Image (cartoon, rainbow, N blue to C red):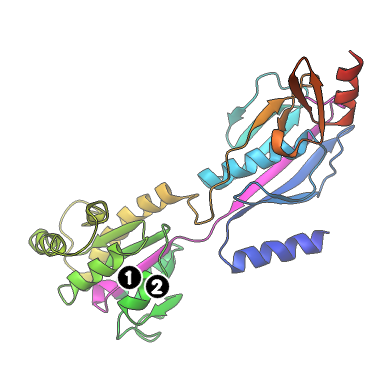
Amino acid sequence: MREDLFAEAQRLRAERRPFALATVVAAYQPASGTPGARALVLPDGTLQGWIGGHCAGPTVQRQGLEALRDGSARLVVLSPTVKTPGESKDGVVRLPMLCAGQGELHVFIEPFLPRAELVVIGDSPVARALARLGAVLDFEVWACDPAADMEAFPDADRIVPDLSALSALLSPRSLVVIATIGDYDEEAARAALASRAGYVGLVASKRRFAAVEAALTLLDIPAERRALLTRPKGLPGAALVPAEIAFSALAELIEVRRRLRGLHDDAPAPARLEATDPICGMTVDIATARYTSERDGQTYYFCCAGCKTTFDAS
C-alpha cells in the first residue's frame, strides 16, 4: 500500500499535478490511525490511501484542500481536549476529536504544487540574466526565441523555439516576461496575452511600453487580457546593466508567485453538501454518507454505524 501510494505521488509530480500528502505522525489510542499511515488528497477532494476512521478522514480531506489552496503545510491535531474548532497558530491546526473513541491523532499535511513557470521571451542579455536568476530562485524556467538553445540558456528547463508553439503551453501559473528589447515586442505580447498566462510583463522604457500598449488596442485581444500587460517596476531606482534589470524584475515576480501560490489547473472541487452527525457532531459529506436515518420527513446523516444505532434507539 505504501509503495503504491508513493508510486502514485511520483506519477502526479511527473505530470505536474498538485496533491497534498497526509501522514500520521502521532496517534494516541483508541484512535484508529497509526503512525506512518498516509493518504493523498487531490484537488477534486479525492482521498487516496487511509489515514484513520470516519472522524479523521473528512477532516484530513478538508485540511488537504486548504493546504492546496494556500500552498502551506500544516500539522493537524485532532484531540478531545480541543474545545474551539479551528484553533490555528504557527502552522498547527487544532480541531476537536468528536467521535466516541476520543483518541488523538496528529497528521502532517504537506502540499506538493508544480513550480511556477518563468517564461522568458527573447534572446537579449536581459533575457539570459532572467533565466539564470530565475533558476536560482526555483522557478521552472522556459526560454522562448528562435535563437534560444541550451548553450545560450543553460539554466532553462525547457526551450520553446517560436511564439506559436508557446501560447498553447501556458497556464495560469505561467509568469511571462518579454525581454525582446524592441526586437519583436508586439508579437511577443500578443502571443502571451492570447494564452492563459497569469502574468505578462514587458521589460521596456515607459515610452516603449506605451507604444506597445497602443499597438495592442488595434489587435483582436479582449480588453481584460490587454489589461494584464504590465511593466515590471521591481526595485526603486534606475537599473542600467542587464543583470540589474533582470534582478529588479524578479523582485516583483517573487511577489506575484506568492499570490499565485496554490493556484492550479485542475478543475475546482465541486461544492460539497455537508451535514452534522446529531450524535457526535462530526461533519458528514452527504453525497458519500453510508449511514442515514429518516425521521419526521427529515434525513439525518451519520459518520458511522454506532452513531446511527444510538440515534435510532433514541
Extreme residue toward the front, this view: 297
Give the residue type that dot 2 points to.
Trp
Marks 2 and 1 sit apart, C-alpha to C-alpha, by 6 Å
Give the residue type that dot 1 points to.
Val
Asked if residue 195 shows in the view, the reply is yes
Vertical order, 90 against 203 (above or below)? above
Residue 105 covered by magenta stretch: yes
Asked if labels 1 and 2 touch by Cβ distance under 8 angstroms, the answer is: yes
Left or right: residue 183 versus residue 292 is left
* Residue 159: % across, % down: 40, 79
Residue bearing the label numbered 2: 142
- N-terminal label among 2 and 1: 1
Residue 58 covered by magenta stretch: no
Which image quarter is the N terminus in? Answer: bottom right
Q: Which one is nearer the viewer's eye here, 298 or 45? A: 298
Please name the residue shown 52% across and 60% down the image.
114
Label of residue 91 in the image: none
* Residue 101: % across, % down: 87, 27
Q: In terms of secondary structure, where does tag 2 sit?
A: strand
Q: Which residues are magenta?
A: 98-127
Residue bearing the label numbered 1: 120
Vertical order, 269 against 122 (above or below)? above
